[in-house]
Image: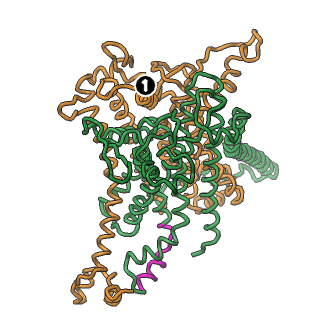
Chain colours: A orange, B green
Amino acid sequence: MSVVEQKSASTGSVIDRTNLEASGLAYRFTWQRLRESLIQMLLFLCALLSVLTTLAIIFVLVSEAIFGIPPEKAFFQEISLSQFFLETRWAPQYSPPVFGIWPLICGTFLITIIAAIIGLPTGLLAAVYLAEYASPRVRSIAKPILELLAGVPTVVYGYFGLRIVTPYLIRPVLKPAEFFGVDWLWSIPVDGFNALSGGIVVGLMIIPTVCSLSEDVLRAVPRTLREAGYALGSTKFDVCVRVVIPSALSGIIAAFLLAISRAVGETMAVTIAAGQKPTLTLNPLSQIETMTAYVVNVMSGDTPVGTIEYKSLYAVALVLFLTTLTMNLISQLVLARYREVYQ
Amino acid sequence: MSQRSIPPLPVEPPQTPPGNSLGSTKLIEESFDSELARRHRYGMIFEWVCWLATWGSVVILGVLIATMAWQAMGWLTPKFLVSMPRRNPADAGILPGIVGTFWLILLTAVLSVPLGVGAAIYLEEYSKPTLLTKFIQLNIANLAGVPSIVYGILGFTAFVRMFGLAKSEYLINLGIGSLQLTLPFGRTVISGALTLALLSLPVVIIASQEALRSVPPSLRHASLALGATKWQTIWHQVLPSALPGMMTGVILAMSRAIGETAPLVAIGAATYITFTPGRLNSVSEAFTRPDKLAQVPFDSFTTIPMQIYGWINEAKPEFQHVAAAAILVLLVILLISNGLAIFIRQHFQKKVRW
């Protein structure tokens, strides 16, 4: 230990300054104190970096979509808002190009709905099982496996949707005539790329998210509520469904919102499985394009920087960013309130 | 908490028997028994459905791996791991992907772990609950939910193009051998690593904060009482105790980064490339040729997920099997890293008792 360090240690540099002044010990400069405050400043800068990232995202999206940096024109300075929100075609390759966002929103919506139908109930039921029924031993086995499911990359889910779900799950059910080679069965047309397979794999993908978040909120419900339920003669089922789930409802809704926002922002799986053709349809068996898939489509091609098609991806990304941001914010606020209620 | 209204409980209030005769009491008991049996039956069905949801999800993971293995059968050979991608599916390999993923994740970790842990230490140990701290906290939680493709757009604009500030590409000779730096970074390893670092930063911060929170305050108090400064306390006491938790979080964040495809597609990483970053031809060259090693961050690259995406888009049906083989390699890597993270957590959870 250096002399400086010994000194500061003996004067007790950890006592905060108001106490020091009150006790008549004036603030003295030591290298130790300088080092301490430098470290604190450095760590504060690290924390500030996250705010900087958000600002950078907003700056990039806004500068290419809404207000261009002077010589350059932004997307909405060339394309009117009314065309963007009222036109029903998305056709950047036409001349003049037409940019109506609805086909992309519709595609994203289809994927999200299918994913929610599959992922939300399954995730919640699995959470109820883990929180209420499973023994600690079973939980210690099942939870890590569900975490592994969350760790599977989205490109793998995309392949799974395109090469396994569509030909071996959707086709046999909807086109048994062709699949089994008998002509008296029904045959419903299905595209090779379809929203259904994309939605199914995204639904599988959000199960772990829903499950782990809901399990946390279910376990945060105080024991006393459960015991009161049992004392009144409820069965375990009654306690689960009529006491625990309603008490945790706000937290569960927050978990659902977070999962839905993940489904909205999901990119590779839907690009690969659901296709890249913007269509204004609610038919889950046809090829569609989501907002995220459009961004990938433009960025993986060789669209020259500065063209209107290039700028359109920032406009789409802005809509995507605002949608997910709103959902995340609501969900965070609900979760924060929920934590306060039970602490 | 006690203010919260408790939902109505299912049990009907016991009805007072209309008469005092023995027969009617018996009747009520019987109907109560059948009612109870019905409720228990519902309970059984519900428990069974919950059980199915949990283990069904587990089975899906099994099905996923099994079908990939089935698709990749015969294509995943030792040669596949050590050869370059080729136009002929039978000769294709994922060597540049494996090496590219390694360098990319190494750089990402070097960039994001110190920054993330630093931010977590500030938020947990130094910050007072001011409005600014609350804002930073909410902001981090939101960043964790921003779609990865948006990070890709940020990375493309800020690192690959550098906002179009440079009108042409500048080649800067760094004066160390033939080391060259291009000034908008272009589609290089460093652009990818910076993008992925921003992407994984919120995850690293949140995981590290949780690890720091689990260290009991008494440990800090003891250290401070013995005269250690704040930073000495953090560095010598808090960080070592929080290390296992942080490692778990960091490994999970990095394995998420390994599988990321969308941001790399956005920054324009190659899907087909026939050299490794820095043109290193063997492992030993990384030690004998420092000039090549230093060039690694500024070279083009591909990763395993990018190669998979490239092969999925190929027209020849054989490439689908090549993609499946690459998926299997990727899944094995992720299973190992995730398994390691889970092992560290379980192991230290059992060992450490505060």
**Above or below — where is B96 with respect to A158?**
below
Residue at 35% x, 88% y is A6
The residue closer to the viewer here, A21 or B50, is: A21
Q: Where in the figure is residue B259, as x and y percent of width and height?
A: 54, 43
The answer to whether residue A238 shows anywhere in this view is no
Q: Quadrant of residue A100 in the image?
A: top left
Location of residue A90 with respect to B51 vertically, above or below: above
Q: Amino acid at mark 1?
A: Leu
Residue B192 position in % (x across, y down)? 43, 44
The residue that label 1 is drawn on is A104
Query: In the picture provided, is A192 more to the left or to the right than B128?
Result: right
Residue found at x 62% / y 57%? B340
In this orientation, which residue lies closer to the viewer: A233 or A56?
A56
* In the image, residue A9 above or below residue B147: below
Instruction: Name the residue nearer the viewer: B103 or B110.
Output: B103
Q: Position of residue B79 (x, y in %)?
A: 67, 39
Span of residues in magenta: B212-225
Q: Is residue B221 magenta?
A: yes
Q: Callout 1 environment at 10 Å: few (<14), some (14 to 19), or many (20+)?
A: many
Chain that bears disc 1: A
Give the main secondary structure, helix, strand or loop, of the magenta stretch. helix
Disc 1, SS: helix
Q: Is residue A170 left or right of residue A33?
A: right
On the question of residue A2 being in view, the answer is yes
Asked which quadrant contains residue A156, the reply is top right
Where residue B315 sits in the image (x, y, percent)?
58, 21
Residue drawn 66% across and 36% down? B325
For the N terminus of chain A, the image quarter is bottom left
**Disc count in the image?**
1
